[in-house]
Image (spheres, rainbow, N blue to C red):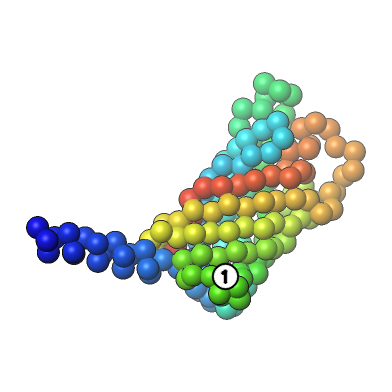
Amino acid sequence: MKNLVFAVVTILCATVGFGQAYDGAGDMKFQIGINAQTNGTGITGSLDYGIGQNFSIGATSTYMLGVNELINVPFVDKFDIKARVNANLGDVFQLADNADIYPGLNLSMKNFGGHLGGRYFFTDGFGVFVEFYTPIAKYNDELTPSEEFHNQFAINLGASFNF
């Protein structure tokens, strides 16, 4: 019994110790979670690919759910897709290997914006993330209520996976 407990603790410690929040060029992360913004919530997904020691590129998409009860929202206003670039700064700030923070810029169907995110990995393949988005320049200054979706401060949080 003592050996079994020792083996389980060793495996858990090794698994947690090997989680990598960002591993440089060739690193690939998939994230899925919820998006929260004024008058709506939705689902979000993103894929990031490392192209340097501290630099990654990717895409993210969000779809708003259950907003037709508030206002009549066409599909194009519920959906957004963004190209993004991240500066992965976990090693710059000397964080543990399983933690990363990443500011970045994104260009979407709705605006040009910025984001700040963080990841924490519990194992080599599974972690959690949180991201804060804000528009910097909107394509249209006079927005209808439905066009305000994806054109305001938003928070994403959910699960992150290594590929």
In terms of depth relative to the viewer, which is nearer, 27 or 75?
27
In terms of depth relative to the viewer, which is nearer, 65 or 3?
3
Q: Residue at x 62, y 53 (%)?
A: 131
Does 163 sit left or right of 76 as displayed?
left
Q: Position of residue 11 (x, y in %)?
A: 25, 64
In terms of depth relative to the viewer, which is nearer, 65 or 22?
22
Q: Residue at x 72, y 61 (%)?
A: 105
Q: Position of residue 97 (x, y in %)?
A: 47, 71
In which quadrant of the rendered image does the N terminus lie?
bottom left
| Residue 155 visible in the picture | yes
How many marks can you see?
A: 1
Residue at far top of view: 69
Q: Find residue 147 and report its image quarter.
A: top right
Does dot 1 land on a helix, a strand or a loop?
loop
Q: Residue at x 61, y 32 (%)?
A: 65
| 13 versus 79 height, above or below | below
Question: Mark 1 — residue?
Answer: 90
What amino acid does circle 1 point to?
Answer: Gly
Residue at far front of view: 2
| Residue 83 visible in the picture | no
Q: Position of residue 4 (x, y in %)?
A: 13, 60
Residue at far left of view: 1
Q: Find residue 36 and report its image quarter.
A: top right
Q: Residue at x 58, y 52 (%)?
A: 130
In which quadrant of the rendered image does the C terminus lie?
bottom left
